[in-house]
Image: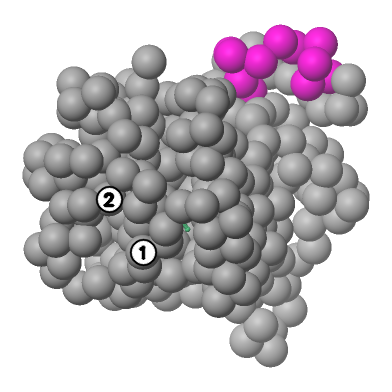
Amino acid sequence: MKILVATDKPFAAEAVSLIREVVEKSGNELALLEKYTEKQQLLDAVADANAIIVRSDIIDQDVVNAAKELKIVVRAGAGFDNLDCAALKEAGVVAMNTPGQNSNAVAELALGMMVFQARNHYNGTSGSELKGKKIGIHAYGNVGRLVGVIAKGFGMEVCAFDPFVDKATIEKDGVTVFDTVEELYSNCQYVSLHIPANDKTKKSINYDLLSKMPKGGTLVNTARKEVICEEGMVKLMEERADFRYLSDIAPANADEFAAKFAGRFFFTPKKMGAQTAEANINAGVAAAEQIVKFFATGDETFRVNK
Ligand code: 3PG
């Protein structure tokens, strides 16, 4: 079987070697398309692929139409909003993700951005410490839980809101659980976002919710920019000079932030949360192993388009 790794933002070289090892040892063939600049390059590369491993690369109806031999797509990562799951299902193609594999990298970035902001971007002025501050974890999945673990190391008080996780499970980690999202935002100076981007969550982090945050409110977004109501964020930051926004990937209106809110925001130029050798190896190898197992035994663990 031909397994294509199609990554606009490439994996670390070591991860690619290990993916190759898994693929070739199992008697399959590896093809590589990295740093492509045109959609057509992806459409050409998928034509004879039986499986594809992607990161945030967009797998839409055009790609599905072009991939006539395709049986499975694995998103090497957690969020699969880049896959048209319905189109894949319609074409009889299995879609999977690799949950948990890159979570530590994302969690470390969330805390890293918080320290960077608390120390005024290391500009030589006196900043503040994370110790003793409250952090609210909005969605207590693989990344959220690890953010909590690291935040505790900083001496932060960890709180969470997640209607999909049993309260007692979260409390076992020594985390205070709030029953409503409004309570979480009202009580925490820092909020770290870990919700997926879907029809229900897009633009859901809006002015009303953010304005509940206490003085020095700082939103840390290592999830997806689409979940933020950007107009609401701008309105709030115009009204509140104490409010700060940190995001792993710049919002559409980044120029407006640069013009109006210097020193109160930080945006990564590319999605950086999972950009570590360790995360690339964990997620990339897991994706390759899932594909090999699927072809060998039909195993559909981690399928997301049932
Ligand atoms: C994820 O959903 O796993 C992260 O956002 C990582 O995305 P990336 O593989 O494009 O860096």
In the image, the segment drawn in magenta is 161-171
Rendered view: 132 above or below 244: above
Residue 248 rendering spot, x and y as whole percentages: 47, 59
Name which residue lies at 31% across and 54% down.
57
Q: Which badge, 1 or 2, is on the more N-terminal residue?
A: 1
Which residue is at 74% across, 30% downward? 159
Whole-percent x and y of residue 174? 89, 27
For disc 1, the marked residue is 31
Q: Amino acid at mark 2?
A: Ala
> Where residue 283 sits in the image (x, y, percent)?
58, 51
Residue drawn at (51%, 52%), measured in percent from left and top? Answer: 27
Q: Residue furthest front?
A: 27
Residue 169 in magenta stretch: yes
Would residue 268 appear left or right of 69 to someone viewing this image?
A: right
What residue type is disc 1 on? Ala
Please give left or right for residue 134 compared with residue 96 in the image.
right
Crowd band around label 1 with a 10 angstrom C-alpha radius: few (<14), some (14–19), many (20+): some
